[in-house]
Amino acid sequence: LRRYRPEALLNERGEPVPEILALAPRGERRMGANPHANGGLLLRDLHLPDFRGYAAAVPVPGAPGIGDTHVLGPFLRDVAHLQSGQTILINGASGAIGTFAVQLARHYGAEVTGVCSGANGDLVRSLGAVEVIDYTREDFTRRGKKYDVVFDAVAKFPPARAKQALTKTGVYLNVHKHSDADSGRGIGPEELLVLRDLIEAGQVRPIIDRCYPFEDIVEAHRYVDQGHKRGNVAIRVV
């Protein structure tokens, strides 16, 4: 078995665990994030009430960059300076990162506008968006409304055009290129603990579209590559 040394690995009591042996549970729940792999690392299911256990816990760490859902909250707060009462537009609001971003922005008290397909509008509203824009019918930059923060959670909208929807002091964020004011944040146990507490309190919930057994991982990738998944796709490896 491959041995990992994630920068952030915690047991169920929130204590740092320096090293683990992948796929070898040692009697307690653990979660962590590996910045050198495309996604997080989780050995056992977190105690998440009303979720589907293991499958619901897997997507929590996320993917590298500001796509790490456990650093997304601090990124919105400390880099975008998102505050209660401000407005944020999230492009790709129904995706893996977008569904977390909507909920975290609402947690900070912001007014959220989500951009997604019309079919996913109800989902995004249920996560806290006060307004939903169907990108298949409307270009948000042509509405004339300005936002304090524009976050492209899927990096599919031209940055120059997206910035047209910002206020004069607004901040643009991109899931791949970060923002004009930051080059990315590191991974730390504190961010994992904050996200864990929000999830256990029911203020944030991972959205699972589908869960595939490991032997169907090719089919899972094909589904994700279609670009229409809602939230996350999980792979069962044990």
Image (cartoon, rainbow, N blue to C red):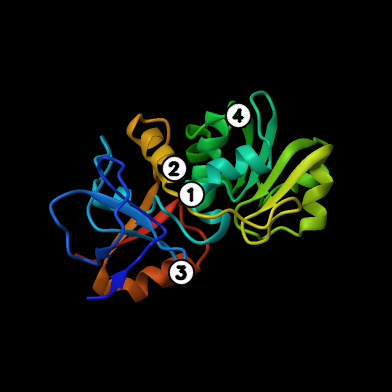
| Residue at figure coordinates x 47%, y 33% from the top left | 126
The furthest residue to the top: 85
Instruction: Using the rendered view, name the quadrant where residue 106 is placed.
Output: top right
Q: Which residue carries the number 3 mark? A: 36
- At label 1, the amino acid type is Thr
Measure the alpha-carbon separation of dots 1 and 3.
15 Å
Measure the alpha-carbon separation of dots 1 and 2.
13 Å
Mark before the other along the chain sequence, 2 or 3: 3
Measure the alpha-carbon separation of dots 2 and 3.
19 Å
Q: Residues within 10 Å of mark 2 (few under 14, many from 20)?
A: some
Measure the alpha-carbon separation of dots 2 and 4.
30 Å
Mark identifier at residue 69 = 1
Measure the alpha-carbon separation of dots 1 and 4.
22 Å
Mark before the other along the chain sequence, 1 or 4: 1
Q: From the viewer's perspective, is 150 left or right of 226?
A: right
Viewer-side label of 1, 3? 3
Q: Which residue carries the number 2 mark? A: 190
- At label 3, the amino acid type is His
Mark identifier at residue 130 = 4
Helix, strand, or loop for circle 2?
Answer: helix
